[in-house]
């Protein structure tokens, strides 16, 4: 079965530094044979979490909008790539809105206990974070990591790797960066190979189990 990759663009600026980085990642994944989909949050019809806590009791979000079918696809995909530029030392409001809406899965896992991802599932479902920042500080991404970690944990993905590029102001944008676009392309291919390898290993193990 083809490996599926969803790339989510959390930048409000279309075809800017971060979406361009995501495009290269998805190109690398597609060239490795994956089925890729890019989702641009800007322009989608959505609301951020209202904090009503209804999902704590029902396991269902009361909001019905473009995020509703997106979460269904995210739960089915093998690889999820979240992307956002750094805004005020964190991720954008667009990506944060999506991540907060994943609270329903947190509620299902930890309160209602009707959602569970086993070790093999988490190992074979990979999450990647791509980001760009204007400043040259290495720690400019530090505010983003715990937030994307929460999302990957809630939805059963192993936090596989990052593609980050700082110093956009000095480079004059992502196309001036010496390595980031190549790194994104390479990691797009590598994550697909990694999932394919795990899938082959588990199918071989199932075959051995059947013959024993
Ligand atoms: C509202 C806003 C806040 C920003 N805050 C930061 C910041 O805290 N640190 C930083 O390094 N860059 C910051 N930047 C710069 C962006 O992270 C940078 O230009 C990024 O590459 C833009 O990506 P994009 O082209 O995908 O929008 C900010 C930009 C905007 C518009």
Image (cartoon, helix red, strand yellow):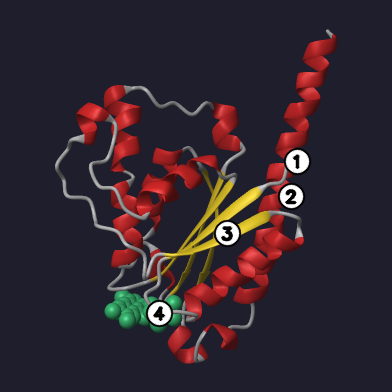
Mark 1 beta carbon near ligand 1 (under 8 Å): no
Q: Please state which of residues 168 and 59 is positioned toward the viewer in this rendering.
A: 59
Q: Residue at x 67, y 54 (%)?
A: 35
Mark closest to the chain's N terminus, 1 or 4: 4
Residue 37 is labelled as 3
Q: Residue at x 70, y 54 (%)?
A: 34
Spatial CA span between label 3 and label 4: 19 Å
Residue 175 position (above or below residue 104): below
Instruction: Give how far across and how far down residue 90 sits, in percent.
Output: 32, 66
Mark closest to the chain's N terminus, 3 or 4: 4
Residue 178 position (above or below residue 31): below
Instruction: Give how far across and how far down residue 189 sits, in percent.
Output: 71, 59
Mark 2 beta carbon near ligand 1 (under 8 Å): no
Which residue is denoted by mark 4 in the rendering? 13
Tell which tag, 3 or 1, sits nearer the viewer: 3
Instruction: Give how far across and how far down residue 119 sits, in percent.
Output: 55, 28
Quadrant of image for the N terminus: top right
Spatial CA span between label 4 and label 2: 31 Å
Q: Is residue 8 visible?
A: yes
Element on which disc 4 rests: loop
Mark 4 beta carbon near ligand 1 (under 8 Å): yes
Mark closest to the chain's N terminus, 3 or 2: 3
| Ligand 1 lies in quarter | bottom left
Element on which disc 1 rests: helix
Mark closest to the chain's N terminus, 4 or 2: 4
Residue 197 is labelled as 1
Q: Please state which of residues 113 and 35 is positioned toward the viewer in this rendering.
A: 35
Quadrant of image for the C terminus: top right
Q: Residue at x 58, y 49 (%)?
A: 79
Residue 57 is labelled as none
């Amino acid at each position: 079965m083809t490996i599926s990759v969803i790339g989510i663009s959390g930048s409000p600026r279309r075809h800017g530094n971060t979406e361009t980085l995501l495009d290269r990642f998805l190109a690398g994944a597609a060239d490795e044979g994956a089925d890729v989909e890019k989702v641009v949050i800007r322009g989608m019809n959505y609301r951020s979490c209202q904090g009503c806590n209804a999902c704590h009791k029902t396991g269902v979000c009361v909001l019905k909008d473009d995020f509703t079918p997106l979460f269904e696809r995210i739960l089915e995909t093998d690889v999820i790539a979240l992307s956002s530029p750094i805004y005020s030392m964190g991720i954008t409001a667009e990506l944060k809105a999506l991540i907060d809406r994943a609270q329903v899965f947190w509620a299902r896992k930890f309160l209602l206990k009707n959602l569970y991802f086993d070790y093999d599932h988490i190992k074979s479902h990979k999450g990647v974070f791509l980001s760009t920042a204007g400043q040259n500080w290495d720690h400019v991404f530090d505010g983003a990591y715990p937030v994307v970690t929460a999302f990957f944990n809630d939805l059963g993905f192993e936090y596989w790797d990052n593609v980050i590029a700082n110093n956009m102001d000095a480079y004059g944008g992502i196309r001036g960066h010496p390595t980031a676009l190549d790194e994104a392309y390479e990691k797009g291919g590598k994550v697909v190979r990694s999932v394919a390898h795990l899938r082959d290993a588990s199918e071989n193990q199932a075959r051995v189990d059947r013959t024993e």
